[in-house]
Image (cartoon, rainbow, N blue to C red):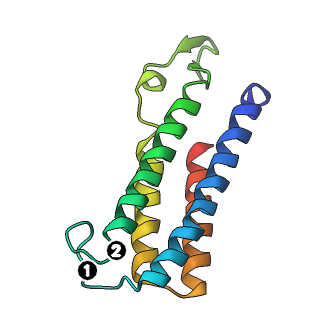
């Protein structure tokens, strides 16, 4: 059963890597802009473009994760009778939620903290959250 889903898992893991790598330019851009605490996202003029780009990146990856997760098999095996049946939960379009919230969270963390350690922690944390969530 795992071997059937291995190509899909590989694609979703690579998408997790791409989402984490996409946060690096955002973090460097936030350091250059000097966005910090006390700036209201999107409302205040400093960093407004940064926030719009962060939201667009989060929405783009959320849509990609949703589209790629629709290729996953939607059949589950009953643990008692060992029969295959269709899973109703697999048909609901909810795969976009975790990437959207995780990427927006990483964007907010990188907007406040500009050190190299925070950049590494945010990108690796995003990769691990999205990688574990996709499996």
Quadrant in the picture for residue 6 = top right
**To which residue does mark 2 refer?**
47
Q: Nearer the viewer, residue 31 or 108?
A: 31
**Residue name at image x 45 percent, y 78 percent:** 30
Badge 1 element: loop
Q: Could you say where residue 108 lies in the image, as x and y percent from the top left?
A: 39, 71
Position above or below: 105 against 79: below
Q: Could you say where residue 47 lies in the image, as x and y percent from the top left?
A: 34, 74
- For label 2, count other residues whose C-alpha is less than 10 Å away and answer few (under 14), some (14-19) or many (20+): many
**To which residue does mark 1 refer?**
39
57 left or right of 69 in image:
left
Badge 2 element: loop
Position above or below: 96 against 101: above
Q: Quadrant of the N terminus?
A: top right
Q: Quadrant of the C terminus?
A: top right
Position above or below: 128 against 70: below
Mark 1 or mark 2, which has the lower sequence index? 1
- For label 1, count other residues whose C-alpha is less than 10 Å away and answer few (under 14), some (14-19) or many (20+): some
Q: Could you say where residue 68 lies in the image, as x and y percent from the top left?
A: 58, 32
Dots 1, 2 in contact, CB < 8 A: yes
Q: CA distance from mark 1 to mark 2?
A: 8 Å
Foreground label between 1 and 2 = 2
1 left or right of 58 in image:
right
15 left or right of 7 in image:
left
**Residue name at image x 48 percent, y 83 percent:** 32
**Residue name at image x 41 percent, y 52 percent:** 56
Regarding residue 77, the answer to whether it shows in the image is: no
Q: Nearer the viewer, residue 77 or 86?
A: 86
**Residue name at image x 35 percent, y 85 percent:** 36
Regarding residue 94, the answer to whether it shows in the image is: yes
Q: Could you say where residue 72 lies in the image, as x and y percent from the top left?
A: 61, 26
Position above or below: 112 against 77: below
């Amino acid at each position: 059963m795992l071997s059937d889903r291995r190509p899909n898992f590989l694609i979703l893991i690579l998408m997790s890597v791409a989402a984490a790598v996409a946060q690096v330019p955002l973090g460097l851009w936030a350091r250059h802009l000097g966005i910090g605490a006390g700036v209201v996202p999107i409302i205040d003029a400093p960093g407004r473009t940064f926030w719009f780009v962060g939201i667009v990146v989060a929405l783009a990856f959320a849509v990609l994760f949703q589209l790629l997760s629709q290729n996953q098999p939607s059949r589950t095996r009953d643990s008692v009778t060992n029969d295959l049946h269709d899973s109703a939960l697999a048909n609901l379009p909810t795969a976009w939620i975790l990437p959207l919230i995780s990427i927006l969270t990483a964007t907010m963390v990188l907007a406040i903290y500009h050190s190299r350690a925070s950049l590494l922690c945010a990108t690796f944390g995003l990769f691990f959250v999205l990688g574990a969530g996709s499996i």
